[in-house]
Amino acid sequence: MDFSVIGSSLAFILYMLATLAVVTRLFHPKGPNNTLVLSLASAAILVHAVLLFSHSAINFNLPNVVSLVTLTITIVVTIVALKFKVNLLLPVIYGFTGLWQMVTIFLPPIDSIPLEVEKFILLSHISLALIAYSILVIATLFAFQVTYINVKLKSKNLAAVAHLPPLMQVEKQLFKILTAGTAILFISQVIGFAFLEGFLAKENAHKTLLSLISFAIYCVILWGHFEKGWRGHRVLVLMLSASGLLTLAYFGSRFIKEFIL
């Protein structure tokens, strides 16, 4: 059996076990068994990383990029889970990352898209864009958590949030993460405009436009929160809109090119 199939299958099983360990005790008075959850997740991350970086050349085809982004998000949230209660986020992240590992087994062969490490500027732009995307997706997940806690508090369903951190703490973390992600996205865009010749070319115009619109929305969210006190559903809707546009910018055309055309 192919090494990638074995690795993806093992990572899928470990991620699913971590997901089950959270979900089955999500509303337990003591919450999930963090030692068990994080041990399973760490094992899954290790297998995932070995599988992703086992090739000698950097491969930027769509499945590998998605795998890299999900690995980054999973690592960051797992580290956050060591200190903060993010139980609502864990099954979503572990579940999706595990399912993607299984999906990659059944994808048709796709041509490798290597990128020479010597092209430092292009590599910096891509790396910062992926890091920004990962951070902003995490911020969007935090926005869901804030909305969930807020709804339960308003309905006076205290039992549903007893195992979760205080609303104000999660909201504070949300806007710290959003600020960091927006700043990194801005740096990525500046590098693209200043140093990459094809950044404004016709074939990249849709990606550039969508990423700029999403960046503008993230800036509006930050302005609205710090200047006007925006929070709750308004922030969540805007976050979803911006993250959706950024996803289309980074992955939409590549999906069409690599899987449909």
Image (spheres, helix red, strand yellow):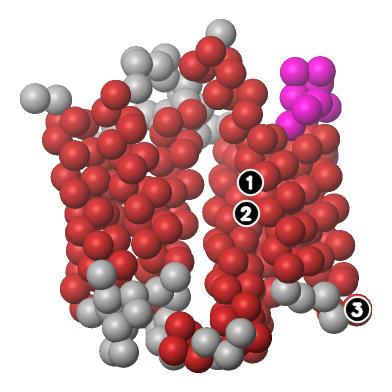
Residue 116 left/right relative to 243: left
- Residue positioned 24% across, 46% down in the render: 12
Q: Which of 69 and 16 is in front in this view?
A: 16
- Residue highlighted by disc 3: 228
- Residue positioned 58% across, 90% down in the render: 156
Q: Between tags 2 and 3, which lies in front?
A: 3
Magenta stretch holds residue 127: no
Quadrant in which the C terminus appears: top right
User: 72 above or below 141?
Assistant: above
Task: Specify start and end residues of the magenta stretch as a single range.
Answer: 194-207
Which three-letter amino acid code belongs to the residue tagged 3?
Lys
Image disc number at residue 129 = 1
Which three-letter amino acid code belongs to the residue tagged 1?
Ala
User: 169 above or below 185?
Assistant: below
* Residue 105 locus on image (x, y percent): 27, 28
Examine the image and state in which quarter residue 23 appears. bottom left
- Residue highlighted by disc 2: 132
Distance of label 3 from label 1 (alpha carbons): 29 Å
* Residue 2 locus on image (x, y percent): 14, 25
Q: Residue furthest top?
A: 261
Which three-letter amino acid code belongs to the residue tagged 2?
Ala
Q: How crowded is mark 3: few (under 14 residues within 10 Å), some or many (20 or more)?
A: few
